[in-house]
């Protein structure tokens, strides 16, 4: 072993390892991680809902508010059409992720030629969709601040920015992961043997998407 | 037995394995990481114990002022925080690390480097939360950190910063370890090691890992809220802005109650190994023991608000949590009875490990009974925030978790070091510990019932509390003496203890089929497991002959026991055997360091130095990410 190249030893190891279930270790760990993340986002979402309507001053998510001291009128903060667009982009990214995984799994097989069969294209598209979502979120946060809502303003601001900020951070980590995978694909080309790595990344990415569906419904759509 | 041969082979092995500080900083071997956890946690046990001694000295008599009231707050906060997060959990982690791979017939955990990372985050996080006490800046808001006392308005100093950030760091360690052990237990069991053949310690550990991954994220979220309140001016727990202190209490106890089972179930697992071995009889009701562990874990998530009966949740919520709390007494009681039934009719031996195990049964039962008293809200209202509660949880945590862990240490010391601990000193340790703990904690039932509140700095004479407090304080000094005897025994036995062979106790499970201490690859040949008690099939088949190990086995009992496990006595190097061993690496330590630096930046931010804070956080963050990439791109073995 010591004389073999490090990378060679690594690969040999991957193939000869016995596992009880036949599943990859990291895949099981990722499912456990996702279970744990459900409790994290569960706590964040619950806190947002518990505090909904309990801010003592505005602005509020769904109705305008007049400051009793200055008389200034603050519009309802949430802009559902804009966030619907970014939600659509994020949901599409899950589709791209599925196609990226399929392209890696079936690399070189008939039907996986050209741009639409290229794992690089789909990985890049997924990452791009993630970036677009983050840009939307940056725009959203900036415009909310201009409308008078910061994380310090009231309970709505505190719980809203914390919840959506945590989700945005998860998307950002996912984008970093996707770009790393894309970099590897460009550098040496991903093969069906790497599919497990893309598969695990996809699990994470789909989870982050599913969480957004919950957030979008509970925070934005339900008034 | 192999005792005579053990000494020269062990000496040979010691010379061929790596030694020195660098090898400990870079190790990824689950056994060495287990030993690191053990030593570090024992060190913090001394720290937490000395904090307790100071607390009890202050309370020995009415109106003493041995320490200042402010420092007293830091002492009780750090005593609780230390014992929960830096002592009992890591002592359990020491056993998870050392034993789980050995018990399931694996060569290491699923992610050896992540395992090293967990340890280093714990070690550095422990320093982060402990060191401030030397500057009088230790956390002072209780181990439960109730908001808004822990928030910026009422706890504006640096003290609770260290608590919030320290717990956040320690949570990363526990979570990373839990993902690792879940994967290890699901996916690295030797052929034939079905779930229902796993040793009971591994079973209880398995349940605990699920409690960790589901409970810790909740406290993580709550700590983020508190952290944001303290550092970024949010209003989560600011009453004036509509924030609700009860939200903190709910989130804390949704974590905090499962945490209680995270502390006790590993000790339950350890005594479930010790009792059958020294009763020379299989564990009574194995299946029910496993199921009751799962039941405890499951119900453990539905009882948190019994910590909050006095906040006025209303009759419906009170009733639900009251009933759930009474229910959880059932699987716990099942375990107690099964341990007793394990001993019944057995051929009993009473080494120190066995004494501690039996001690756990007795002491935990006392704590369990007072626990059931608290499940009734009217009764709890009389007891809440009094020393009665302190008596209760010290019976379950000291009398339960710590006694169980001591049983585990005496039982597994020969496996870990190849030598026995002194039984004679162990006897002194046990009896002084047993008397000391009862002398310390039993009178607290009385002082509590007489109305002495928890967490008070001092008290006036003439309230009927004086004698009980003096008793508690004397007991604490006995505990200190017993602890020092243990420490002496532990350290001197490593070199001078009588040599132990593979299987000094005649125990039934796989970890005893390999040399003591185990070679770095654990098993030269991965065993094929055909029963719950492979070593007894080999050495004492009469004990296990009639046992079915699963429904499938029922018809083929004889066959199942016909293929006993192979005992390994030879000690060769991994290289000779062609077994790949993960490379030692410093990177997990570097990532852990990056995380601690990143969090420290917030302390600097609180100090008002914005540029330095940003530099610290960005520097720590970049160092963490860089080390992480270096780690992920380097091969494991």
Image (cartoon, coloured by chain):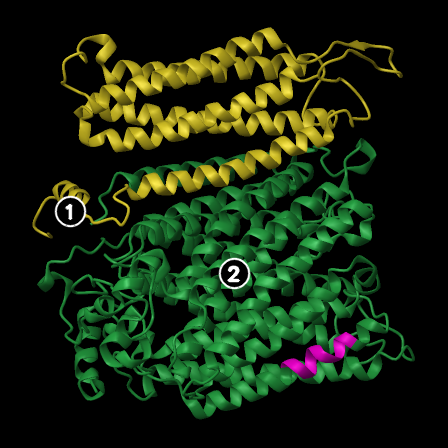
Please tell me the colour of chain B.
green
**Left or right placement of residue B287 versus residue B306 in this view:** left
Callout 1 and callout 2 share a chain:
no
The foreground one among B176 and B591 is: B176
Q: Which one is nearer the viewer's eye here, B619 or B435?
A: B435
Q: Colour of chain A?
A: yellow
* Secondary structure of the residue carrying numbered label 1: helix
Q: Position of residue B562 (x, y in %)?
A: 20, 70
Q: Point out the stretch of residues depicted in magenta.
A: B437-445
Residue B50 colored in magenta in the image? no
Tell me if residue A33 comes above or below residue B429 in the rendering.
above
Measured from the top left, where is residue B449 in percent x and y?
Answer: 83, 72
Task: State the image coordinates of residue B414 (x, y, percent, origin top left).
Answer: 33, 79
Q: Secondary structure at mark 2?
A: helix
Kindly give the residue lying farthest to the front in the view shown. Answer: B555
Which residue has dot 1 on it? A16
């Amino acid at each position: 072993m010591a004389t073999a190249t490090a990378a060679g030893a690594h690969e040999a190891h991957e193939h000869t390892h016995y596992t009880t279930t036949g599943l990859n270790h990291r895949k099981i760990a990722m499912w456990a991680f996702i279970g744990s993340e459900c409790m994290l986002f569960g706590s964040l979402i619950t806190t947002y809902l518990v505090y909904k309507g309990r801010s003592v001053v505005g602005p509020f998510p769904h109705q305008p508010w007049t400051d009793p001291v200055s008389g200034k009128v603050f519009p309802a903060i949430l802009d559902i059409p804009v966030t619907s667009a970014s939600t659509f982009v994020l949901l599409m990214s899950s589709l791209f992720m599925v196609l990226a995984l399929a392209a890696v799994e079936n690399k070189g097989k008939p039907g996986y030629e050209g741009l639409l069969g290229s794992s690089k294209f789909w990985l890049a598209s997924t990452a791009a969709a993630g970036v677009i979502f983050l840009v939307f979120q940056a725009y959203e946060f900036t415009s909310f601040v201009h409308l008078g809502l910061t994380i310090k303003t009231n309970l709505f601001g505190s719980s809203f920015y914390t919840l959506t900020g945590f989700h945005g951070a998860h998307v950002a980590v996912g984008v970093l992961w996707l770009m790393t995978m894309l970099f590897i694909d460009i550098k040496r080309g991903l093969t069906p043997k790497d599919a497990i790595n893309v598969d695990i990344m996809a699990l994470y990415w789909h989870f982050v998407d599913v969480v957004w569906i919950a957030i979008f419904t509970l925070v934005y759509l339900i008034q | 037995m192999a005792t005579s041969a053990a000494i020269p082979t062990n000496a040979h092995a010691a010379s061929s394995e790596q030694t020195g500080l660098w090898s400990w900083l870079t190790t990824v071997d689950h056994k060495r990481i287990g030993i690191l956890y053990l030593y570090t946690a024992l060190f913090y046990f001394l720290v937490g114990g000395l904090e307790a001694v100071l607390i009890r000295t202050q309370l020995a008599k009415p109106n003493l002022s041995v320490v200042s009231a402010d420092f007293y707050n830091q002492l009780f906060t750090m005593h609780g925080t230390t014992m929960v997060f830096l002592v009992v959990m890591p002592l359990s982690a020491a056993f998870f690390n050392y034993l789980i791979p050995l018990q399931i017939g694996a060569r290491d955990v699923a992610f050896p480097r992540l395992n090293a990372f967990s340890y280093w985050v714990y070690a550095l996080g422990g320093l982060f939360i402990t060191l401030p006490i030397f500057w009088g800046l230790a956390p002072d808001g209780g181990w439960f950190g109730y908001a808004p006392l822990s928030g910026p308005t009422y706890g504006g100093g640096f003290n609770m910063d260290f608590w919030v950030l320290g717990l956040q760091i320690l949570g990363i360690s526990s979570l990373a370890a839990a993902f690792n052990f879940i994967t290890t237990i699901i996916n690295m069991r030797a052929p034939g090691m079905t779930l229902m053949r796993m040793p009971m310690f591994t079973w209880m550990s398995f349940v605990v890992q699920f409690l960790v991954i589901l409970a810790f994220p909740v406290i993580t979220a709550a700590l983020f809220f508190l952290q944001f309140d303290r550092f970024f001016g949010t209003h989560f727990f600011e009453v004036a802005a509509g924030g609700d202190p009860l939200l903190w209490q709910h989130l804390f106890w949704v974590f905090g109650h499962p945490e209680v089972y995270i502390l006790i179930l590993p000790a339950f697992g350890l005594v479930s190994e010790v009792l059958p071995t020294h009763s020379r009889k299989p564990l009574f009701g194995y299946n029910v023991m496993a199921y009751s562990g799962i039941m405890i874990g499951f119900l453990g998530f539905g009882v948190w608000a019994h910590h909050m009966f006095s906040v006025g949740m209303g009759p419906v919520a009170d009733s639900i949590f009251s009933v759930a709390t009474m229910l959880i007494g059932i699987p716990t009681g099942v375990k107690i009875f099964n341990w007793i039934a394990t001993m019944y009719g057995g051929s009993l031996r009473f080494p120190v490990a066995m004494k501690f195990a039996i001690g756990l049964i007795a002491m935990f039962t006392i704590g369990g009974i007072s626990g059931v008293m608290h499940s009734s809200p009217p009764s709890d209202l009389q007891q809440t925030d009094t020393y009665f509660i302190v008596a209760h949880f010290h019976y379950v945590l000291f009398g339960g978790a710590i006694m169980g862990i001591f049983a585990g240490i005496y039982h597994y010391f020969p496996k870990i070091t190849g030598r026995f601990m002194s039984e004679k000193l162990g006897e002194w340790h046990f009896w002084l510990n047993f008397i000391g703990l009862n002398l310390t904690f039993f009178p607290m039932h009385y002082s509590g019932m007489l109305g002495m509140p928890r967490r008070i700095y001092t008290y006036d004479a003439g309230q009927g509390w004086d004698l009980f407090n003096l008793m508690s304080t004397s007991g604490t000094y006995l505990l200190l003496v017993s602890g020092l005897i243990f420490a002496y025994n532990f350290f001197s036995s490593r070199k001078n203890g009588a040599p132990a062979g593979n299987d000094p106790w005649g125990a039934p499970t796989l970890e005893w089929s390999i040399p003591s201490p185990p070679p770095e690859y654990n098993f030269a040949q991965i065993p094929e497991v055909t029963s719950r008690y492979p070593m007894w099939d080999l050495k004492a088949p009469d004990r296990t002959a009639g046992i079915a190990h699963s429904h499938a086995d029922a018809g083929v009992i004889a066959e199942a026991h016909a293929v006993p496990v192979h005992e390994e006595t030879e000690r060769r190097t991994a290289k000779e055997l062609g077994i790949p061993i993960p490379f030692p690496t410093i990177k997990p330590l570097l990532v852990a360091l990056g995380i601690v630096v990143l969090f420290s930046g917030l302390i600097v931010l609180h100090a008002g130095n914005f540029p330095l804070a940003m530099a610290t956080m960005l520097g720590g963050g970049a160092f963490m990410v860089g080390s992480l990439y270096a780690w992920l791109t380097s091969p494991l073995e």
